[in-house]
Image (cartoon, rainbow, N blue to C red):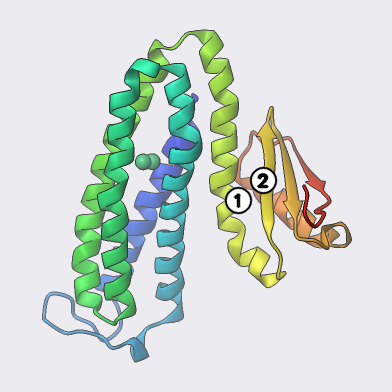
């Protein structure tokens, strides 16, 4: 089913946020709901990376929807523009809630962060439900020709969303990554200026993408030239 990659990412985001809430609720030394607030000194690195990972993943998810998915849906169904615009508008309050959540967490207000995270989860699930219904209706009413064209756009969207998760690995290698193209199961990637000499990094990226997206058949690496592709 064409919406599977989207559903998988929505599931991953909801699960990640539920995990963050659970981690905050049982945060060492903090009894949420009893008015105790933890200071930054007691924060564990595990929960920090959990929160950071979730916020980043969500921002990337919404950016890719706005840049790739929504324009693709609009091409399939121009008459659905008001509904697609509404989906994009729903991203704003989610961005604001994400910001409030991050600010509270980084300032050590764990109880407040936990409270905001619960509202956040409800907001996210409501948007995801609406988004899924709108997309399903557009795809169900599209002809087979339009759907074939959309498959590649969904593939590209999935690859770009997943590539965002490679950030920690790239930091480790002091490198950068750009998805040049993703279609028909083939992903073209440009990795940092020293990419050709970095075979192990290329192997890791290739393995990661193939493991996360079964539709990836091949990952090709392009040389990065200063001032050009
Ligand atoms: Fe969305
Ligand atoms: Fe979404």
Horizontal relation, residue 154 to residue 83: left or right: right
Q: Residue at x 49, y 39 (%)?
A: 67
Do residues under tags 2 and 1 come within 8 Å of each other at their CB atoms? Answer: yes
**In 3D space, how far apart are the residues under numbered discs 2 and 1 (Cα atoms)?**
8 Å
From this view, report whether residue 11 is shown above or below residue 201: above
Foreground residue, 45 or 22? 45
Horizontal relation, residue 197 to residue 107: left or right: right
Q: Please tell me whether mark 1 sits on a helix, a strand or a loop.
A: helix
Foreground residue, 71 or 155? 71
Q: Residue at x 23, y 82 (%)?
A: 30
Disc assigned to residue 119: none
Horizontal relation, residue 126 to residue 141: left or right: left
**View extreme (front): residue:** 227
Q: Residue at x 12, y 75 (%)?
A: 33
Percent from the top left, x then y, of residue 156? 59, 36
Q: Please tell me whether mark 2 sits on a helix, a strand or a loop.
A: strand
Circle 2 residue: 179
Q: Residue at x 29, y 27 (%)?
A: 83
Quick check: is the Cβ at mark 1 less than 8 Å away from ligand 2? no
Quarter assignment of residue 220: top right
Can the viewer see residue 22?
no
Circle 1 residue: 163
Foreground residue, 20 or 223? 223
């Amino acid at each position: 089913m064409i919406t599977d990659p989207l559903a998988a990412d929505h599931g991953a985001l909801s699960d990640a946020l539920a995990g963050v809430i659970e981690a905050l609720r049982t945060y060492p030394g903090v009894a949420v709901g009893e008015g105790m607030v933890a200071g930054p000194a007691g924060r564990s690195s595990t929960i920090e990376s959990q929160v950071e990972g979730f916020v980043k993943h969500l921002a990337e998810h919404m950016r890719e929807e706005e840049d790739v998915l929504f324009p693709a849906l609009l091409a399939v169904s121009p008459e659905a523009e008001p509904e697609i615009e509404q989906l994009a508008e729903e991203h704003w309050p989610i961005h604001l809630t994400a910001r409030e959540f991050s600010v509270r967490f980084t300032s050590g207000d764990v109880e407040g962060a936990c409270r905001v995270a619960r509202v956040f989860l409800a907001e996210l699930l409501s948007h995801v439900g609406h988004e899924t219904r709108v997309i399903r209706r557009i795809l169900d009413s599209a002809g087979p020709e339009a759907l074939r064209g959309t498959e590649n756009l969904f593939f590209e969207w999935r690859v770009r969303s997943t590539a965002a998760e490679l950030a920690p690995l790239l930091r480790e290698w002091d490198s950068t990554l750009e998805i040049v193209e993703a279609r028909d199961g083939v992903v073209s990637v440009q990795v940092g200026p020293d990419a050709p000499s970095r075979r192990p990094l290329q192997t890791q990226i290739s393995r990661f993408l193939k493991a996360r997206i079964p539709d990836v058949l091949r990952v090709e690496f392009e040389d990065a030239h200063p001032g050009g592709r």
